[in-house]
Image (tube, coloured by chain):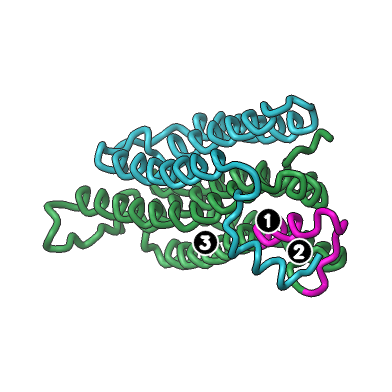
Amino acid sequence: MQMTEPVAHQFDDAAQQQQAATLGMWVFLCTEIMMFGGLFTGYTVYRHAYLAGFAAASRHLDVILGAINTAVLITSSFTMAMAVHSAQIGKRTALTGFLLATILLGCVFLSIKGVEYARKFQEHLVPGPDFQFDPGLRRQAYVFISFYFAMTGLHALHMIVGIGLLSWLVVGTMRGRFSSAYHTPVEITGLYWHFVDIVWIFLFPLLYLVERHH
Amino acid sequence: MTSHIVSPKIYVVVFLTLLALTALTTCVAFYDLGPLNTVAAMTIAVAKGLLVILFFMHVRQSEHLVRVFVVAGFFWLAILIVLTMSDFMTRGGDNQIPHTATAIIQTRNPA
């Protein structure tokens, strides 16, 4: 049975309704750009003023784990794109598989992030009374590490929400909600997941690769 | 958007390019290029972001109205960063950081 979307009365047809959903998602993503943008701007201001401390603290992050996590997230974006493609051509089994692969990669990313966070606690590199660093650069490094936790933390929160949305799509797919004629939720969630990937594409060089060559 | 189905081959090419750029940005960071290190890192990040937006997020095939919103979002981000930095980068001497933030950090974490 081919599922089609009921068209709400304010739309001419299903295509226009789908376009409105895409546009609405981009409006939401614009607000996300502004939310992360505030953090990126704050980061840029302090990096400009505290370059020495930022470079010293950045060297305490594990560049190998950071690069692996970037690759994991890019792979998850690829599986998400393939999930949307499978939905477009109406292949339900492939859609379920790609959605599950995306969820799995998201969990791998969060696990690696968890390992990194745990190490920061062991190394006393967490904002708070326990923070330890070379006294000369302590205050600057403190700001860097605070940005590190705020930015990666907000990003990780978005990943958790994304995994929740993907799980909801898996349930929907298994109940036969999506077809080549109607798969708007898959497309929209794809846009969200790719956006979260883009945020990390910028976080990786900004946090892990500050003045690494010294 | 639904009417334009992209071939999976394109997704594979974009995916491999993104992985290659990740390796490139990581390697380049370990060579001393002076101020060009930051320029290289940000250029590669923007290139990767564009690939994701244009191909994975289908903006290449989307209607003009969606593109206007996408461009507006990033344009406003550029205003936020460029105008803020045009202030901070042209301040002299000790006046670089908003004091209140510095003061708070000092009180909480005496050096």
As for residue A2 lying within the magenta part, the answer is no
- Which portion, as a residue range, is magenta? A129-149
Residue A117: assigned label: 2
Q: Nearer the viewer, mark 1 or mark 2?
A: 2
Residue A141 belongs to magenta span: yes
Drawing shade for chain A? green
Between residue B60 and residue A60, name the one nearer to us.
A60
Label 3 lies in what chain? Answer: A
Q: Image check: A32 left or right of B111?
A: left
Identify the chain drawn in cyan: B
Q: Are marks 3 and 1 on the same chain?
A: yes
Mark 3 element type: helix
Q: Quadrant of the C terminus of chain B?
A: bottom right
Q: Residue at x 38, y 52 (%)?
A: A30
The residue under the point 52% across, 66% down is A161
Q: Earlier in the sequence, mark 3 or mark 2?
A: 2
Residue drawn at x 79%, y 38% is: A212
Q: Residues within 10 Å of mark 3 (few under 14, many from 20)?
A: many
The answer for which chain carries disc 2 is: A
Question: Which label number is shown at residue A109?
Answer: 1
Separation of residues labelled 3 and 1 (CA atoms):
12 Å
Residue under pointer 3: A162
Type of residue at label 2? Tyr
Decide which of tag 1 and tag 2 comes sooner along the chain: 1
* Kind of element beneath mark 1: helix
Depth check, front residue: A160 or B91 = B91
